[in-house]
Image (cartoon, rainbow, N blue to C red):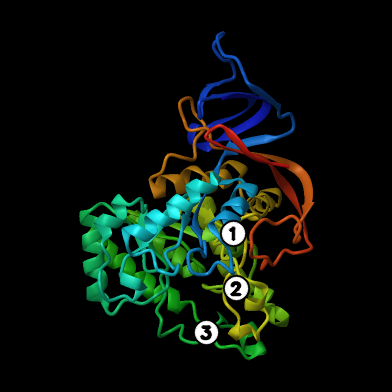
Amino acid sequence: MSTLIKNTRLLDPSNQFDAVTDIYMADGRIVAIGKSASTYAADNTLEASGLMTIPGLVDLQVRIPEPGYEHKGTVASETRAAVAGGVTSLCCSPDTLPVIDSPSVATLIQDMAKQQGLARVYPVGAITRALAGSHLSELKALKRAGCVAVTNLREPYADSQVLVRCLEYAATHNITVFFSSVDAALGQGGCAHDGPYSNHLGLIGIPDTAETVALSRDLLLVEQTGVRAYFGDLSCARSVELIANAKARGVDVSAGVSIYHLMETEQAIQNFNSLYHLQPPLRTEADRNALRAGVIDGIIDTISSCHQPHEMAAKMAPFAATEPGLSGIETLLPLTLKLVERGILDLNRAIQCLSCNPADIAGIDAGSIGIGDTADLCLFDPQQLWQVNSASLFSAGHNSALLGEELKGRVRYTFIDGRNIHQV
């Protein structure tokens, strides 16, 4: 199967390419850009004037509830949502039921994703058994089974000595560790940023020190053990400083932020809006500005959706009793484009944080549109307006804070292995 995409603006930060051109695909790969060999014959031709082509997005922080929580979403529904959002590769968190702490569960999830033939799913394994923080999982076996990293999510370790042993073992086997740093005691019972809005609403607050105290410890132990680490959901200004200092010392760390922490602040929880009940919580305007500056300056490497689908009942209790997380994989790109339109982010930098950077961190073949690369592409219309509603979302979780809103920038086509698997 060969496909020719004509007259598209190709933006590929990994190859420093930005021009209107033609893209030639055959047998799942990019075979030429601009002009092909005289022997090339396209089975399909797509006229893409007015559309921008970028590498398929790579999302490092996605929750797929299956197995165990199929009422919230399945591999089928969430990979369908991913390609609708231009995401061709995603890393799924290990908090399924059973937890991804064995090769059999990791293999099961990958097999289910392959059966769907939509987005590529790369499991992140649990670094401790059942995420309990006490006993090391079979990390080497998890890596062989396809896990691109390991994590304990926001679950605590029994003590720092357990964490050191985990990091030493991961470093020995060249396994990346994903961190979501939090001091459980400092954040205990909290559901919103510890500030005027949580105080006004009578909600238990989570201070930013719940993140920075744990982050300081984690960075020191990463430096001590030499493990490769990714800190994926920063939420405050001091965390950006800590990551910057670690990078300046040559520590092998990378960092990420959710698109919602770049867009919103603690004000979003006014009127007890449980759709913005997130972990870590949305914080102050100063924190948001520091996170934005971190992306601009290259301290923060990735922007993710932190996609977590829920049934609507999970968001209908009193704020503190609702389940944290929102459905965001289908709105990741247009929200990022909104930051570009407002002049907050450069377009090239934004696409870099959505494609080649996360691909490099996960160590996967993605994020680039060069000759010989796998043909995973996202084509979008940067001017098209569309409304976020139940009819336009493919995720089983409609717990989006954007329901009813109109966004600019719509994914028109998504290609994986040169196959057109989504179009509108």
Q: Residue furthest top?
A: 38
- Residue 390 in the image: above or below residue 317: above
Q: In which quarter of the image is the C terminus?
A: top right
Task: Determine which residue is flagged by label 3.
Answer: 190
Q: How far apart are marks 3 and 1 (CA)?
A: 22 Å
Residue 395: image quadrant is bottom right
In-image side of 52 versus 92 (left or right): right
Residue 259 image label: 1
- Give me the residue at 50% from left, 67% from top: 237
Observer-nearest of 397 and 186: 397
Task: Determine which residue is flagged by label 2.
Answer: 284
Q: Residue furthest bottom?
A: 202
Q: Do the residues labelled 3 and 2 touch (CB within 8 Å)?
A: no
Helix, strand or loop status at disc 1 = helix
Q: Which amino acid does label 1 sit on?
A: Ile
Q: Quadrant of the N terminus?
A: top right
In-image side of 95 versus 319 (left or right): left
Observer-nearest of 109 and 309: 109
